Structures are given as structure tokens and as C-alpha cells.
Image: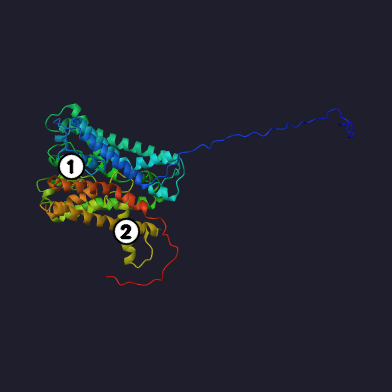
Amino acid sequence: MSQQRGYRRRPGDVVLRRVRLQPERVRAERRRRIRITPRSWMVVVLFGLVMLLGGAILHLPVSSQSGESIPFLDALFTSVSAVSVTGLTRFDTQETFSNFGELVTLALFQLGGLGVTIYAGVLIVLAGQRLGMRGRQFFGLELMTTGVDGSGASVLLRRVMIYTAVIEFITFVLLLPWFLIEQPGGISPERAIWLSIYHAISAFNNAGFDLMGGSNSFIGQAHDAWPMLVMGVSAFLGSLSFLTVFNLRQPRRRWSLDTRLVVTGMSLLLVVGMAFFLIADWSRLFADQSVGSKLVNSLFLSVNRTTGMTTAPLDQAGADTSLAMIILMFIGGASTSTASGIKIGSFMVVMFGVLSALIGSARVVAFGREIPSSVVLRANALVLIALGGYAFGLLVFIAVDPHIDVLPAAFDVMSALANCGWSQGASQAATQAGANILILMMFVGRLGPLVITSLIPDRPREHFRFPTEAVRIG
């Protein structure tokens, strides 16, 4: 052919041949990737399932010290109290539950104390995707410096677990000598080790559960400063927020606004609460104590506004002390911590909003930073909804249990809603209907703030704006 066209092959020429491919039909299946978008209801459902499972296990005869089944609703009350790290009980934990039952309660408040962070991290890792600003704010990951993808969540989860294990282990080591030497009654070394582990985990997780017996918390140890200081510091570190602790490692100029608000608010509440208890109860709850014991016990009470442990008989507290405790319980600890309440961040934002209104500022500014209007609206909504829920719960509780005085009822209902655990006896004196109200309040108190803040949009959904007109107030 080449010769017919006048082409003569020369040395070095390369002849290329093109292979003609036959059409082939290939069936390709698209690989489906499981994608889980974190939603607030997932955490609620997961918490609810853990509470039901815990109640079912505590209902078993093996969980009871007497070998007989505890009524399911009472077992559920304990389970909800443990998972919500509240500490309210219908009966004494040490006198009612067996060693297995005590172990179950420990596992429940360990899961509950770290629940929100751990479940959030697991959902993010399972999702295997980057989260937008909405998802980051929902899980409290917007302050992370390691990113917000799956590896970032894994890093946060690993840091939280290490931090938790270290603080709980140190608390255990510091409590063990006291239980071995100072604890009256001559308990065995094995029991002393178990008590140290139990109270170390309970203190850090702000659970408020104890195994001291008699439903007296640590009233019998009011003169022993060592365990009060150890558990008080552990409870404070647990309520301080994991993200805040991680951010505190940075130089002060690099602290986030959230860290500044948390550190300032927690410190102020600690000092103000301690000063109030010291002055108000100098000659009442602390009347038979030395000056040093009064200082330690007032500090312990101020710290335990999120934990529920106490060294003073709260049913003998005056009206002023009870009201102060109700306010402190309502505020609670920091977000992404083992504490509950409306959270110190919400409280500080509302306070700076009030200050901005008083000075005539149109924007809320704190520590040289402007707080977004969406955050201000979310904080105000959370506080008002919490107050409304408390008022409604208190009214229903008083209606079903009219034989309980108003002040103890108000105290225990707030303790349930704020997941504190302090009690003036209303929880034990309540009927089953009243106990069910407290169960609902504990559940709402643990998960309500998380759900409310996640449902409120980050940005106002405005398609148009109406004319502005002033309204008379005050």
C-alpha cells in the first residue's frame, strides 16, 4: 500500500498500528458510603436508652443487697439520677445496693458525666465527614485547634479520655490513704480501695453519689479537711469544661472569649458562694466547727453547687441559704463539662447583655470582643425556657405532693432540673407521682440546654424586615 502511495520505508522509520477496541459494556456499582449527620435527637435517644437499660439492671435481684428486686420505678429513678449526674436518690445507695449494684451506678454516672462529649465524638467519627459551622457549634468543637473533621474529633476524644483518667486516678490516689487510715469502723483494704475509686469518679463527674451510708453524704466527715479539699478540687476541674482546660495551656493572650468567660464566671461564683456560706452559716450550719473547718466546708459547699455532695445538713438551712443554693444550682458549670445547669457561659452572656443595656450600648461586648447577636438570643432563650420549665415542674410537683412544704419542694425540684443532687428531703418524701416529676426534670435538665441551643438557628432567618416601632417597658 505504501508503495502505491509513493512512500518508501527508510531505515529508522517506525510503523504504528492502532488497535481497534470493541465496544464493551461494564456495569459499575456505586459504592455507598454511610453518612450520619449528627442531630440533637440522637443524643437524647441514646441517653434515654442508657437510662432504661440502667434501670432494668438495677431492678434485678442481683443489684439489691437484700436479694429482692427493687421496684422498677425506684431503680429507674436511680438510673436517671446517675446518668444525668444528679445524685438525688429515693434511698441510701450503700444500704440498698449490692456490690454489683454499686458498680452499675458507677458505670452509669461515668457514662453520663462524659456522655455528651463521647457520644458527639463517636457520631462525628462515624459520619466520616467534615462538619459545617452548625455541627461544630452543636458539639462544642468550634474552639478546637486541630480541625473539625474526623481526625479532629478523634484528637478531642482522646484528650478528654486522658484528662478524665488522669484526674480520676490522682483523686483516687489522694483519697486512698484517708479511707485506709482515717475512716472509722475499720473497713477492709479492698473496701477502702473501692470507696476511693467510687468517690473519685463520682466527684470528678459531678455525680454526687456516695457510699458513706445513712443518706447523710459527708456530714459525718465535716471536720476532715483532706477528703473535702481533694474531692472539691476534682469536682471543680470536672465542671470547668474540657475545652477550657485545653485552652488554658495556651498563653493568656491566646485564650478564647469562651475561656475568659468560663474562668471569670466560675471563679466569681466560687468566691461569692464561699463568702456567702461562710457569713450566713457561721453560727448556724457551721456552728460547732473550728475556723479552719468553716473555711473548708464553705468552700466545699460552694464548689458542690454542681455536684450535690455536702458536709452540712441542708434540711436545717435557713431560707436565705436555700435561696442562694437554688440560684447557684440554676447556673451550674461550664458547657462541655460534667456539670449541668444553664451553664456559666449562658449566665455570663446574659449578664454582659444587661450591662450593655445599662450603659446604652447596642452591642454586647465582653473582654474586647463583640458577642454575636445569635449567641445573645440563644442565651436569653435558654434562661427563660429553663425558668419556665422550673416553674411548671414546681407547680406540678406541689400539686401532686401538697404535703411537702414549698421551700423543700422548690429546692429539690431545682436540684433535679440543674442536676445538682442537693436535697432537703422532698425527694425521699415524695409520692411515686412526685418522683416521676423529678425523673422528668432530671432528664430535661441534662439534655434540655443541649437541645435548645442546637435548635435555635445561628443566623436569623429573615426574608424581609418589618417597620421598627418602639414599645414602652418598665
Residue 95 image offset from top left, x and y in percent? 14, 35
297 or 327, which is in the foreground?
Answer: 327
Quarter of the image where one finds residue 103? top left
Q: Which mark is residue 380?
A: 2
Q: Are marks 1 and 2 in contact (CB under 8 Å)?
A: no
In the image, what residue type sits under mark 1? Thr
Check disc 2 and give the amino acid type: Asn
Label 1 sits on a secondary structure element that is loop
Residue 305 appearing in the image = no
Q: Label 1 to label 2, Cα distance in Å?
A: 32 Å
What residue did someone put label 1 on? 89
Q: At which x and y percent is residue 358?
A: 31, 66
Describe residue 48's horizontal placement relative to residue 126 as left or right: left
**The N terminus - image quarter:** top right
Q: Residue at x 37, y 55 (%)?
A: 456
Q: Position of residue 425 (x, y in %)?
A: 13, 47
Percent position of residue 53, x then y: 26, 37
Circle 2 sits in a helix, a strand or a loop, which is it?
helix
Front-lying residue, 111 or 312: 111
Classify mark 2: residues with Cα within 10 Å, few (<14), some (14-19) or many (20+).
some
* Residue 346 to residue 178: above or below: below
Which numbered disc, 1 or 2, marks the residue that appears first in the sequence?
Answer: 1
